[in-house]
Image: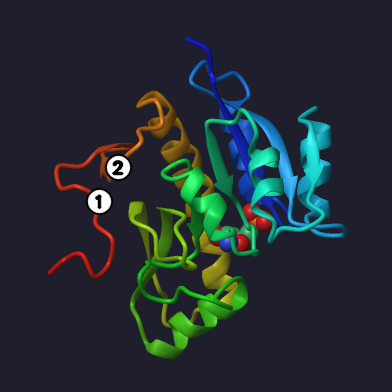
């Protein structure tokens, strides 16, 4: 079995990228073949991690250009947004349907959308009084953080949490959830339809109920 080629799109320090690089280093199922930064000066930390791992890198000139996105993804069967803060242009989403996934540090559909990234997410969770937060991996569609959910991992909110302490615990879970989802999607051959994964013991398996897009529930 040839490992499924995976491209990782980044804008930040790259700890989720590192979790993928570590998890897939000797994997027969999936392999990180390219790291794509959202622009000059972005993702410096992530690009350093890619260089240390010997993975080729690309720096986008115009992240709003669908052709440039598709070229950067290239022969990769799966594109993973790991701390990538730019909007994927709708034309690229359409041509890469069900092949682009994103990790978000909250339990979507809550605490997502334009501008909801980084510390702001955790501050909003605490301000809402929510007792549960977590991480979500979902398909990327034409709207920020709205694509069908693939898998989620809950993280209890502590009474003494600050945005930073909550962010740190959610990030730990992200580093475990994202590689598991990538491996499972690769094992399934990156299906051309939405898949929903459910936790089964320490693993994630295909869930009974199909993945739904919000607003489809009616
Ligand atoms: C993560 O919390 C991720 O969910 C969010 O941005 C953060 C990036 O972290 N989208 P890193 O660059 O992977 O360290």
Q: Camera-side residue: 109 or 193? A: 193
* Residue occupying the point 77% across, 58% down: 62
Q: Which residue matches tag 2?
A: 195
Residue with the most extreme right position: 41
Q: How far is the residue under mark 1 from the one under mark 2?
A: 6 Å
* Residue occupying the point 60% across, 41% down: 19
* Residue occupying the point 50% across, 64% down: 105
Which quadrant would residue 192 be assigned to in this image? top left
- The verdict on label 2 being within 8 Å of ligand 1 is no
Relative placement, left or right, of 66 versus 44 is left
Q: Going from the N terminus, do you reach mark 1 or mark 2 first? A: 2
Do the numbered discs 1 and 2 sit on residues whose CB atoms are within 8 Å? yes
**Residue 193: x %, y % from top left:** 31, 40
Please tell me in which quarter of the rendered image ligand 1 is found: bottom right
In this figure, what is the number of numbered marks? Answer: 2
Relative placement, left or right, of 203 versus 120 is left
Which quadrant would residue 8 be assigned to in this image? top right
**Residue 71: x %, y % from top left:** 69, 39
Q: In the image, is residue 35 above or below residue 140?
A: above
Q: Which residue matches tag 1?
A: 211
The colour scheme used here is rainbow
**Residue 172: x %, y % from top left:** 53, 53
Relative placement, left or right, of 201 versus 66 is left
Q: Secondary structure at mark 1?
A: loop
Residue with the most extreme top position: 1
Mark carried by residue 62: none
Q: Secondary structure at mark 2?
A: loop
């Amino acid at each position: 079995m040839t490992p499924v080629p995976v491209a990782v799109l980044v804008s930040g320090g790259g700890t989720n990228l590192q979790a993928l690089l570590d998890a897939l280093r000797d994997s027969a199922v999936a392999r990180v073949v390219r790291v794509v930064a959202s622009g000059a000066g972005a993702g410096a930390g992530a690009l350093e991690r890619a260089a240390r791992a010997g993975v080729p890198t690309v720096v986008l000139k115009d992240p709003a250009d669908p052709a440039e996105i598709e070229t950067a993804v290239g022969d990769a069967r799966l594109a993973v947004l790991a701390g990538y803060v730019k909007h994927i242009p709708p034309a690229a989403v359409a041509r890469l349907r069900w092949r682009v996934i994103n990790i978000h540090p909250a339990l979507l559909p809550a605490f997502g959308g334009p501008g909801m990234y980084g510390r702001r997410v955790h501050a909003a969770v605490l301000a809402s009084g929510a007792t549960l937060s977590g991480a979500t991996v979902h398909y990327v569609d034409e709207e920020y953080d709205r694509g069908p959910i693939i898998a989620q991992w809950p993280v209890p909110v502590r009474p003494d949490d600050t945005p930073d302490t909550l962010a740190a615990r959610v990030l730990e879970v992200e580093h475990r959830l994202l590689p598991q989802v990538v491996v499972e999607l690769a094992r399934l051959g990156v299906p051309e339809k939405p898949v929903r994964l459910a936790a089964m013991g320490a693993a994630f398996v295909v869930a009974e109920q199909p993945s739904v897009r919000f607003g489809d529930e009616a």
